[in-house]
Image (cartoon, helix red, strand yellow):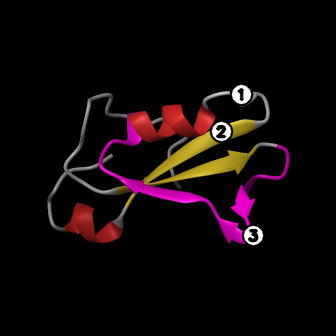
Amino acid sequence: MPSPIPPKAGPAVNATCAVRLIDRRTKLPHRINGTPLVLFTRRPVEAVAELLAGRDPQIWEARVEPLEHASKAGAGSC
């Protein structure tokens, strides 16, 4: 299960992560024109901050998920 808070708080990590904006009321990802909003990044802390900026934290959360191939390659984790 994806982590709601990135465990590593640094400027960048070695693994690429998927960061999703989740509506706490429905537990579903935010969608734009029917497509889930997903950011792919090696800077999950910055991506979370950008996604949550100006949003009500009681309604929105960001989830960070390391991508499979990155963690299998030993590149690190989010």
Dot placed on the residue nearer the N-terminal end, 2 or 3 = 3
Residue 22 x, y percent position in the rendering? 68, 49
Specify the segment rendered in magenta: 25-45
Residue 52 horizontal side relative to residue 65, left or right: right
Q: CA distance from mark 1 to mark 3?
A: 23 Å
Residue type marked 1? Pro
Q: Which residue is mark 2?
A: 61
Label at residue 57: 1
Q: Which residue is mark 3?
A: 33
Q: Residue furthest right?
A: 25
Q: CA distance from mark 1 to mark 2?
A: 6 Å
| 59 versus 68 height, above or below | above
Dot 2: what SS?
A: strand
Which quadrant of the structure image shows residue 36? bottom right
Q: Quick check: marks 1 and 2 in contact, CB under 8 Å?
A: yes
Residue type marked 3? Asn
Dot placed on the residue nearer the N-terminal end, 1 or 3 = 3
Residue 40 horizontal side relative to residue 33, left or right: left
